[in-house]
Amino acid sequence: MPLYEYRCAEDGELITLLRSMDEADDPVTDPSGSGRTFERVQSLFSTDRPAEEAGGGGGCCGGGCSCGKGSGAAG
């Protein structure tokens, strides 16, 4: 199940809940029991590793297809 973030409308507290996708937009019960209201916020994905370089193309005529082009065979 995914994690969703919700911000309190009254004091700005941010909470994270583990919910199914079907429950993502359902009302949130205030975990402190104070009756505060929470709204779902757009969560962002991040990583501490840089993106890897894209690999070379492997499409048709890259040397491995049956057309023979690029593999040294006459086509």
Image (spheres, grey):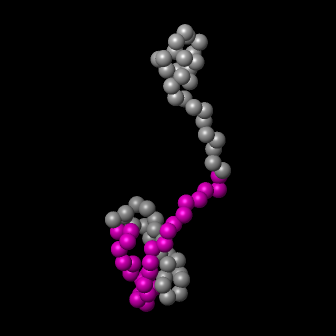
Q: Can residue 63 be seen by looking at this rendering? A: yes
Does 33 sit above or below residue 72? below
Q: Quadrant of the N terminus?
A: bottom left
- Estimate the x, y position of residue 12 in percent, counting from the top left: 54, 83
Q: Nearer the viewer, residue 4 or 42?
A: 42
User: Please, which residue is most extreme toward the bottom here?
Assistant: 34
Residue at the image point whose x is 51% and y is 25% from the top: 60
- As displayed, is residue 12 above or below residue 50? below
Q: Residue at x 61, y 56 (%)?
A: 47
Above or below 10: residue 61: above
Q: Is residue 16 visible?
A: no
Q: Which residues are magenta?
A: 23-49
> Quarter of the image holding residue 48?
bottom right
Q: Main secondary structure of the magenta part?
A: loop
Residue 8 lies in the magenta-colored region: no
In the rendering, at what x and y percent does residue 32 appear?
A: 45, 85
Q: Is residue 72 above or below residue 59?
A: above
**Closest to the observer, 25 or 1:** 25
Q: Residue at x 39, y 78 (%)?
A: 28
Residue 29, x across and y down, in percent? 38, 81
Please give the name of the residue rendered at 35% of the width and 68% of the height, measured from the top-left corner: 23
